[in-house]
Image (spheres, coloured by chain):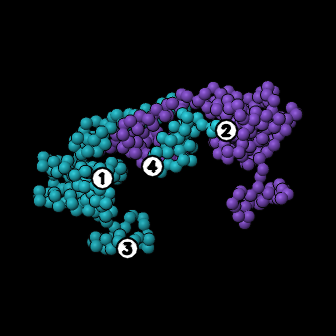
Chain colours: A cyan, B purple
């Protein structure tokens, strides 16, 4: 008995299955959804994938993703160029931009130093950051890598390289998330919150 | 302050967000994954979407999805054409094919009658099924629509149309799923299991 298969459909399911967090059943569901779209919509989806690949590259200043040579943040004249906020990836830039309170520029490392995963300092965009510090009149670098072991180690490593240049290096504050119960905060977060306490 | 955006990237995120079960965060994660793919892989993904749309249509016999005019099941000579199994959609065909025990042909309705959602009998592929019954030497029609209210009603409706033609109409057996605990079976399933009991 020949097994039932529609090769174009199984190829599409396979493609969805390669995406992170998508198993076989979800992939099939997504593929059927794409099939049920009007042809025009499917074309738009397909074009968006190719477009993103063709047009997006790294900003030549901050290494963030951009579809222009210099990204919209770096080219914005109202931004304060004396402060650079160093983050792990583009998603972090988006998260910080959502606060609408930060008016400085960014530098995207595209990763963290992680000897266990074989990622050494020269594999992330530290060189590019140091180059910016030589040229620009930067007064402060905010290390905003994640509060993980690797994020922490990367922040330490980078700050040791920058401090001799006479530039102030800061780190995002640790503490209890706004709206969270003390009861459910882990001990490390709590003890950091106590260390970093402020006068009211 | 101009908001940070990479238009090609946000377009891609938007496209992923339109898929069922994908929220904004997942869509962003998938879009970043697509960006990190080698260009060749992205091209393959994009092509798979277009291809599926261009090549897949309904089998002119059983209305199942196919990339040939007549699907691989309908064109398989070893299949028993005297039995037609009527299902709601292509996913059901795939599920039944996985049992590797069913050697007959299918008919895909592409939906169920559902007055509440405004789906009337002429909006699903019942006409096409009746046409097949007129032409072919069909001896049995197995109604394998889902065990839901709509699936049940559709099975009833279709069987009332077919019975006058002198064709046997059957329905899949209801009962306790293999491997399940009696304790956790709902009452309707249990009472159906008792009604449908077999001698051993």
Q: Which residue is mark 4?
A: A20
| Drawn side of residue B186 relative to residue A71, left or right | right
The numbered dot on residue A187 is 3
Residue at image point 20% right, 58% down: A158
N-term-proximal mark, 4 vs 2: 2
N-term-proximal mark, 2 vs 3: 2
Q: Rounded to the nearest whole Å, what is the CA distance between mark 4 and mark 2?
A: 34 Å
The residue carrying pointer 4 sits among few (fewer than 14), some (14 to 19) or many (20 or more) residues within 10 Å by Cα, namely few
Residues B193 and B76: in front is B76
Quarter of image, res B88 = top right
Q: Looking at the rendering, in which quadrant would you find the N terminus of chain B? A: top left
Q: Is residue B69 above or below residue A149?
A: above
The numbered dot on residue A111 is 1
| Proximity of marks 2 and 3: CB atoms separated by less than 8 Å | no
Q: Secondary structure at mark 1?
A: loop
Q: Secondary structure at mark 2?
A: loop
Task: Check the residue under mark 2 and report the chain it is in.
Answer: A
Residue at image point 28% right, 70% down: A196
Mark 2 and mark 3, same subunit? yes
Task: Check the residue under mark 1 and report the chain it is in.
Answer: A
| Proximity of marks 4 and 1: CB atoms separated by less than 8 Å | no
Q: Rounded to the nearest whole Å, what is the CA distance between mark 2 and mark 1?
A: 50 Å
Residue at image point 50% right, 34% down: B49
Mark 1 or 3, closer to the camera: 1
Mark 2 or 3, closer to the camera: 2
């Amino acid at each position: 008995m020949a097994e039932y298969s529609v090769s174009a459909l199984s190829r599409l399911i396979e493609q969805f299955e390669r995406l992170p967090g998508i198993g076989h059943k979800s992939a099939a569901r997504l593929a059927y959804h794409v099939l049920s779209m009007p042809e025009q919509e499917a074309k738009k989806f397909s074009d968006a994938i190719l477009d993103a690949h063709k047009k997006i590259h790294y900003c030549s200043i901050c290494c963030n993703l951009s579809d222009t040579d210099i990204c919209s943040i770096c080219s914005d004249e109202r931004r304060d160029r004396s402060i650079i906020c160093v983050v792990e990836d583009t998603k972090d830039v988006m998260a910080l931009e959502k606060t609408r309170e930060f008016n400085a520029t960014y530098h995207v490392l595209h990763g963290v130093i992680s000897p266990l995963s074989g990622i050494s300092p020269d594999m992330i965009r530290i060189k590019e950051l140091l180059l910016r510090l030589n040229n620009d009149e930067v007064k402060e670098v905010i290390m905003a890598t994640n509060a993980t072991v690797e994020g922490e180690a990367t922040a330490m490593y980078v700050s040791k390289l920058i401090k001799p240049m006479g530039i102030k290096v800061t780190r995002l504050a640790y503490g209890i998330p706004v709206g969270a119960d003390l009861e459910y905060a882990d001990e490390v977060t709590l003890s950091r919150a106590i260390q970093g306490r402020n006068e009211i």
